[in-house]
Image (tube, rainbow, N blue to C red):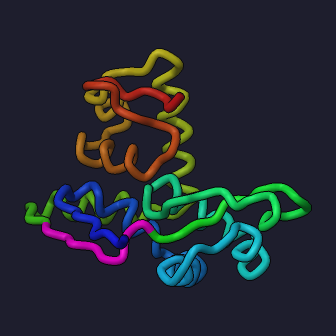
Amino acid sequence: MRRTKVVNDSTDLIPLLRAFDNNTKKEVFNELLLDWKPLSEIKEKYGDEGEGALEYFDRMKLVETKWTTSEDGIDGRPQKKYRSYYSAFNINISCPVNEISEIFTVASLNVKEFEGLENRIFDFVGNDGKFGNMVAENFRLSNLALKGLVKRSNKFCYKGLKLSRKD
């Protein structure tokens, strides 16, 4: 059964834009649209970059996974298989220009810039977390940009109004 991913929050565009930001991710996703693919096959064809794409898709809930049987695995051990969870996207967003510009700015941060900011925020929120407004103010970000950074990252989550490290 194929599903349509509905995107109606502007910040949901960020992980989606990052999901297809290079040829390897695009090619891996296209293969997963066709059928279940085991990790070993993707890794053999695309290397570590292909494995990274699978991890990203899994974090963003763009793929579904299942385990193979021991017979279908590697050296008698089961392995994960992946398939696209969605076959279509329905994007319906209406927002002011300044909001969409914030979204595109966060989505287009290069990996080095993003990881630097992500690590500084990670250190700032600590083990107990901090209120989102306090984090945004400290890093001179809008609340929208902070929300977008959180959606792009795998290190954070909101618990109410508080930004916390993921467990």
- x then y, percent, for residue 116: 56, 47
Q: Residue at x 9, y 61 (%)?
A: 95
In the displayed structure, 18 sits above or below 21; it is above
Nearest the viewer among 35 and 158 is 35
Q: Where is the N terminus found, in terms of image quarters? A: bottom left
Q: Residue at x 39, y 44 (%)?
A: 150
Give the quadrant of residue 106. bottom left
- Provide the residue span drawn in magenta: 85-92
Task: Answer with left or right where residue 87 lies relative to residue 154.
Answer: left
Nearest the viewer among 153 and 76 is 76
Nearest the viewer among 19 and 57 is 57
- x then y, percent, for residue 75: 91, 62
Secondary structure predominantly adopted by residues drawn in magenta: strand
Nearest the viewer among 107 and 13 is 13
- x then y, percent, for residue 89: 28, 73
Give the quadrant of residue 96. bottom left
In the displayed structure, 9 sits above or below 71; it is above
Q: Residue at x 40, y 35 (%)?
A: 157
> What is the number of callouts on the image?
0
**Residue most extreme to the right:** 75
- x then y, percent, for residue 26: 51, 81
Task: Answer with left or right where residue 84 lies relative to residue 89.
Answer: right
In the displayed structure, 92 sits above or below 166; it is below
In the displayed structure, 167 sits above or below 75; it is above
User: Is residue 78 in the magenta section?
Assistant: no
